Image (cartoon, grey):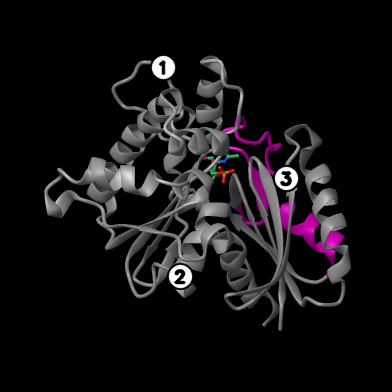
Amino acid sequence: EAALALDIGGTKILAALVRGAEVLAEVRVPTDPSAGPEGWLARAEEAVAPWAGRYAWTGAAVTGLVDGGRWSALNPGILPIPDGYPLMERLSARLGGPAAAFNDAQAAAWGEHRFGAGQGADMVFLTLSTGIGGGIVLGGRLLLGRGSLAGHFGVTAPVLAEHPAHIEDGIAGRWIAGEAARVGHPVDAEGVFAAAQAGEGWAETIVMKSARRAARLLANIQLMLAPARIVLGGGIGLAPGQIERLRELLGPLPPLRRPCLVPAALGARAGVIGAADLARPTIK
Ligand code: BMX
């Protein structure tokens, strides 16, 4: 029995037909931040039209806070979602059948715990993407917490700084592309990593700065939750060379405090696979 799964991120939407950990078909479309939720859902609906009749339920993994089926932005700079948008209801109305929705990183954490690099372990999933998302699985349970807020590491603030910026605004994909433009190389984050791999100094400077800050976040997460593993995902987390840079930066920490970093085994599909599985009980 297959599920339709959507992953709506700050940069792209991934739609997939999922059975267990298997992705039977998938399609990617860009997220137009100005289109709004009805626009994003319309784009997804159009992309999945050829799969009509092939799925029994829908699971969505989306950037932003999802609680009780309602969707809001914590950092509108990642995606400007209106407050309390009735996502679960709208998904079910547009796509037919039961639907459930979750935060993207919480869903990906669950996917990696069930089927990927976090099996049998207390784990944190950290996605370095357009922003930075997180999900926590302890004792085999996905921690949602009050208001489903648990794991929102990207919107934590640098505690000693006077300005209230979200830390993701100085680490993740949007920041990397912004820095590149600032130094005269208007390319996306992927382009910056490619340039760094090709040995271009300006690009290496940017990805190292991002890595140094991400390494501090990883070390802080280790102190707060002491997971057996931190599973790294997202386009930046899985970009060529980045996990190696992070491991090297974390190397000097004493073993007790050093995160055990592993790449997401499900790659960019962790969110759709997790969302499909999390949404499943709604049809029982
Ligand atoms: C932001 C926040 C999180 C999300 C994370 C990664 C919003 C809109 N999003 O911290 O909910 O998990 O970004 O999102 O407030 P992504 O789009 O980079 O995958």
Residue 4 falls left or right of residue 38: left
Up/down of 90 relative to 164, above or below: below
Q: Is residue 95 magenta?
A: yes
Please provide the residue range marked out in magenta. 67-96
Q: Residue furthest left?
A: 254
Query: Is 129 placed left or right of 272 in the picture?
Result: left
Residue at numbered disc 2: 116
- Nearest to the eye among marks 3 and 1: give it: 1
Mark 3 or 1 closer to N-term?
Answer: 3
**Disc 3 marks which amino acid?**
Tyr
Mark 1 Cα shell of 10 Å, populated few (<14), some (14-19), many (≥20): few
- Circles 3 and 1, Cβ within 8 Å, touching? The answer is no
Q: Position of residue 75 (x, y in %)?
A: 56, 33
Instruction: Residue type at mark 2: give it.
Output: Gly
User: Residue sitting at 29 percent across and 37 percent down?
Assistant: 216
Separation of marks 3 and 1 at Cα, in angstroms: 29 Å
Picture residue at 65% right of the left edge, 41% below the top? 11
- Sequence-first tag of 3 and 2: 3
Q: Is residue 155 visible?
A: yes
Give the mark nearer the N terminus: 2 vs 1: 2
| Quadrant in the picture for the C terminus | bottom right
- In space, the residues marked 2 and 1 are separated at their CA atoms by 38 Å
Mark 3: which secondary structure? loop
Q: Which class describes the residues within 10 Å of circle 2: few (<14), some (14-19), or many (20+)?
A: many
The answer to whether 59 appears left or right of 220 in the picture is right
